[in-house]
Amino acid sequence: MRINNFEEYQQAYKKSVEDPEGFWGEIANEFVWKKPFDKVLEWNFEEPNVKWFLGGKLNITENCLDRHVENKPQQTAIIWEPNDPSDEAVSLTYKVLHERVCRFANVLKKHGIKKGDRVCIYMPMIPELVVSVLACARIGAIHSVVFGGFSAKSISDRINDSQCKMVITSDGAVRGTKSIPMKETVDDAIVTCPSVEKVIVATRTRTPVSMIKGRDYWWEDEIKKVSADCPAEEMDAEDPLFILYTSGSTGKPKGVVHTCGGYMVYTTYSFVNAFQYNPGEVYFCTADIGWITGHSYIAYGPLAAGAINVMFEGVPTYPDAGRFWDIVDKHKVNIFYTAPTAIRALMGNGLEYLEGKDLSSLKVLGTVGEPINEEAWQWYHKYIGKEKCPIVDTWWQTETGGFMITPLAHITKTKPSYATLPLPGIQPALMDENGNEIEGNDVSGNLCIKFPWPSIIRTTWGDHERCKQVYFSSYPGKYFTGDGCLRDEDGYYRITGRVDDVINVSGHRIGTAEVEDALNMHLGVVESAVVGFPHDIKGQGIYAYMIMDKPVEDGEMLKKDILATVTRIIGPIAKPDHILFVNGLPKTRSGKIMRRILRKIAEGDVSNLGDTSTLLDPAVVDEIKAKVGLA
Ligand code: WT7
């Protein structure tokens, strides 16, 4: 599975296109299967219907745990670095992790969880989170991890959408100087979730929490009542492994479904190759397991590859902006993977936080989540990588399950702000506005993928039609990513950002419609329109134009109230950075909001608003311009 030089990459790529079944079949055979697959691939992008490794039976946890326990039981699987640097880090060997997963899997079983049941996990970055995820996979329960920053309402929407029977949470969480309630938020959420029968609560902060008899159970009590022996459930390659909700252009977040076999093969393959992971190396991904990055490149990929995985509970700026570098030095991290927003934030804190940091253990740096600007790239390269570590700019999505376009560390020549070249198996296509593929180099268009890869989204939970509409209908026969992209004269790819109504705030995907729905719930709001705008640290910020039912008097207080509503409905990550109260919104005669104009105004660029002749009432644009002082 391992590619060792550029020539091998080219050969692998060629083979993956000419003989995809032969290519992936060989790689898949390097894993532990309970029953070998009969056929590698069956697909069409019309329904869509994609199946990999048909007839194969497996359990991903045997690949992430059991096989390493056999070969290297004493190797560290996870080094958990707590929020407070003066607390001790915790190392879990593969053997210990295996035992904890099996034990907790038995707890799940004891509480009635069976193969195919959905389990919601709402937890901070503590070892119990990884244990919960893998314990679900062990018994074939489908986990739905909800990021710890989401509100009670967001949790309940997700629980209800997939009818989770159980929630796993903790009493509280600590992030930096903040102590955050978790169980309390779950309690609020499940008031409206009749499907939830049981709640398991791990202790972290030991803050007082309500515990309801017959429904709520302490993790630490339950694990004492069960054995540490739990055979892995036999799963079909195409059985769902997990659901992860993500935002789109319209409507509520949708549950992206990944399945067992293809996801395992692809996350492992992409991890090993993009980072050129060597046995014994220490890998540190700063993402939260509540997002796809944490699923694919903390929980599953690295563990399947037998890696040493650093898991960090805290934030990059606590106790100060040198924390990541302290962790790198403390645990001798070789591969460091973070988001451009974190790099920009740390860059802004100045070089003094790098004083006294060694960083000589680093060999490879990675980024993910949003386009990385050249300045951040250069800073990362110079001050963190000391100009000797390649920057692996990994472009991918929740729906792709794993890296799609990325350099291979030390193999692909990097170029600032370019994700460079597709991994073997990935066939990108740039599309023009008429739906035709644009051939050749030095071109740009909308990015599609024209052939399936093993970890492609299979469906959106409970609504296959939505999956088809969102991803497979804009360009029939192709998967549409929602991103704009250019291919330069060398055939290198550079992602330019979303072309739909999705905003990327600090690498988190937020749908404008979702924020508008939350804003519209606030007392007195008549209508709102949300757009993204360039933000120095976050990449994009959220700009909200709002019409109220009466003239606004105490605008500052009202804004705070509105932010409180958004926090309650979605969570703090969806709070607008700017709110502008307006009397009207630019709309076409058919009533469609012209976001293009609102985006320009939010960017502070009104020199060329384009064609406004189709506007219902062009005067609203002048009013808005005057309000922001741009008239
Ligand atoms: C969207 C997917 C994939 C894990 C984190 C985000 C943007 C992601 C890059 C990159 C430019 C990137 C895209 C994509 N994106 N990585 N390296 N360069 N843009 O996952 O929440 O599913 O968001 O993030 O716009 O479509 P996600």
Image (cartoon, helix red, strand yellow):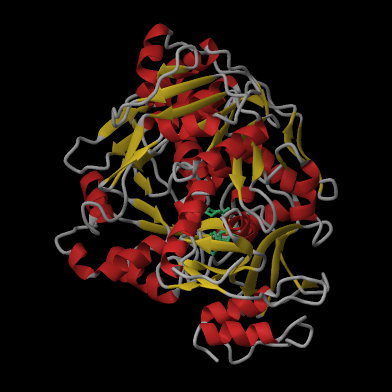
Q: Write down the quadrant of residue 157 in the picture.
A: top right
Q: How many marks?
A: 0
Q: Residue at x 31, y 36 (%)?
A: 79
Q: Quadrant of ligand 1?
A: bottom right
Q: Is residue 36 above or below residue 556?
A: above
Q: Residue at x 68, y 46 (%)?
A: 456
Nearer to me, 89 or 441: 89
Q: Residue at x 65, y 87 (%)?
A: 609
Nearer to me, 82 or 69: 82
Nearer to me, 147 or 397: 147
Q: Is residue 440 above or below residue 537?
A: below
Q: Is residue 250 above or below residue 446?
A: above
Q: Is residue 29 visible?
A: no
Residue 298 spot, x, y in % from top left:
44, 41
Q: In the displayed structure, does residue 282 sit left or right of residue 557?
A: left
Q: In which quadrant is the C terminus drawn?
A: bottom right
Q: In the displayed structure, does residue 327 sit left or right of residue 587?
A: left
Q: Residue at x 60, y 53 (%)?
A: 521
Residue 391 spot, x, y in % from top left:
42, 63
Q: In the displayed structure, does residue 517 sit left or right of residue 225?
A: right
Q: Residue furthest left?
A: 356
Q: In which quadrant is the N terminus drawn?
A: top right
Q: Is residue 119 visible?
A: yes
Q: In the displayed structure, does residue 221 sit left or right of residue 1?
A: left
Residue 69 spot, x, y in % from top left:
41, 23
Residue 88 spot, x, y in % from top left:
20, 35
Q: Write down the quadrant of residue 31 in the picture.
A: top right
